Amino acid sequence: MSKTLPGNRMQMGLSLVELMVAMSIGLFLLAGAITVFGKTRDLYRTNDAAARLQETARYAMSTIEADLRMANYWGLMSRADLVENGPGLDLANPPDVDPAYALPASLSTYAATINSCGAMWAVKLPAYVEAIDDAYGFACAEFGTYAGGSDQLVVRRASTQVIAAGALAASAGRIKLQTSRVQGSLFSGGALPAGYAPTLSETRPLVAHGYYVDQASEQDPGMPSLRRKQLDFVGGAPAITDLEIVPGVEDLQIEFGADLDNDQNADYFVQPGTAIPAGDQIVAARVWLLVRAEQPELGFVDNRTYDFASRTGAAVYTPGDNFRRVLFSKTIALRNTRR
């Protein structure tokens, strides 16, 4: 219906059909915009989760890599057999310590700490890298519950930080290594061991790190994490502490590369616990890290079969859950293995 207005102008309205068509078009465009927004949001979440996985994996790997590259570093030398009061290995049962070895007098007070994660665990210098295959092998308790099937890695070395002569007294009670170009000594006092001149030797804290994977983390009891047992200095005395490196690491696997012709190149790789012939030397490590997202993802199912290192045959891992994962691996050369 129309109405004649002054000046012969006509006022026209919308019919019901026209209004319904306009609303239908508007709803269609709105639905399209909402769909595009939802897809964009899902893509952003997926990309963000993937980026966080990569970041976690890189951080965990860089921490282990830095440690491994320094394995067998003792300050002014890289020969544990020249540490005069250090342990030797039981050649019949490597990497166990020679049963005839006794701690030097300055360390005997701290025997309980030194042995808390295993026999001479904190001072087993000749075993500069050591791994335990698919089982929790530390005598000290894990943080929560060990992640079954994962490996443990131990790295022993001297710290990159030198203790200055003026700070030596304040370090009394800390397990340290004094080295010159030709010898070394373990000690814990606040003065230099006999036979060492300050200008011809260095004092460095001893480092012993034991990596493992736990089913819980400090931020979430349901989140796995990479953790580290470490020789520390607490309240004026040595202590073994448990440090969380990063949450999200679900598995750690190790293989060692051995050199049989003294050219510093790995000629073959073995699983932890595999006997290496006398004369061969570990010069590299191959590390795998399986990292899991923090939150499950709606509509995603991880049906991949993870077949790597010792996770083969019946030990392969197929999660079948809603968490995204990334598998990182790297072969790392040990810098301080030259004889």
Image (spheres, rainbow, N blue to C red):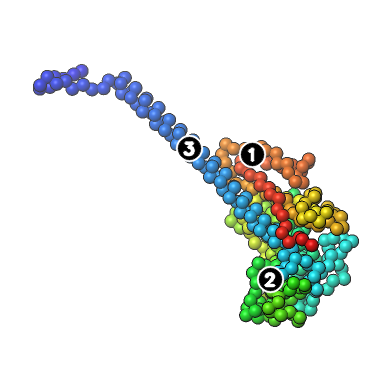
* Secondary structure at numbered mark 2: strand
Q: Name which of mark 3 and mark 2 comes first in the sequence.
A: 3
In the image shown, does 110 or 23 lie closer to the viewer? Answer: 110
- Viewer-nearest residue: 9 or 47: 47
320 up-or-down from 333: above or below: above
Q: Are marks 2 and 1 in contact (CB under 8 Å)?
A: no
Query: Residue 122 lies in what quarter of the image?
Result: bottom right
Dot 3 lies on which element?
helix
In this view, the residue in front, 245 or 164, is 164
**3D distance between C-alphas at marks 2 and 1:** 44 Å
Picture quadrant of residue 317: top right
* Residue pictured at 73% horizontal, 41% vertical: 307
Which tag is nearer the camera, tag 3 or tag 2? 2
Foreground residue among 217 and 115: 115
Question: Disc 3 marks which residue?
Answer: 40
Name the disc covering residue 205, or none: 2
Hey, what amino acid is under mark 2? Pro
**Callout 1 environment at 10 Å: few (<14), some (14 to 19), or many (20+)?**
some
- The reply to whether callout 1 and callout 3 are in contact (CB within 8 Å) is no
Q: Is residue 109 visible?
A: no
Q: Is residue 233 above or below residue 9?
A: below
The crowd level at tag 2 (other Cα within 10 Å; few <14, some 14-19, many 20+) is: many
Q: Amino acid at mark 3?
A: Thr
**Residue drawn at point x = 77 percent, y = 72 percent:** 182
Q: Nearer the viewer, mark 1 or mark 3?
A: 3
Residue 3 can be seen, yes or no: yes
Q: Which residue is mark 1?
A: 302
Residue 66: x percent and y percent? 66, 58
Quarter holding the C terminus? bottom right
Quick one: SS at disc 1?
A: loop
Residue 117 falls left or right of residue 225? right
The CA span between labels 1 and 3 is 22 Å
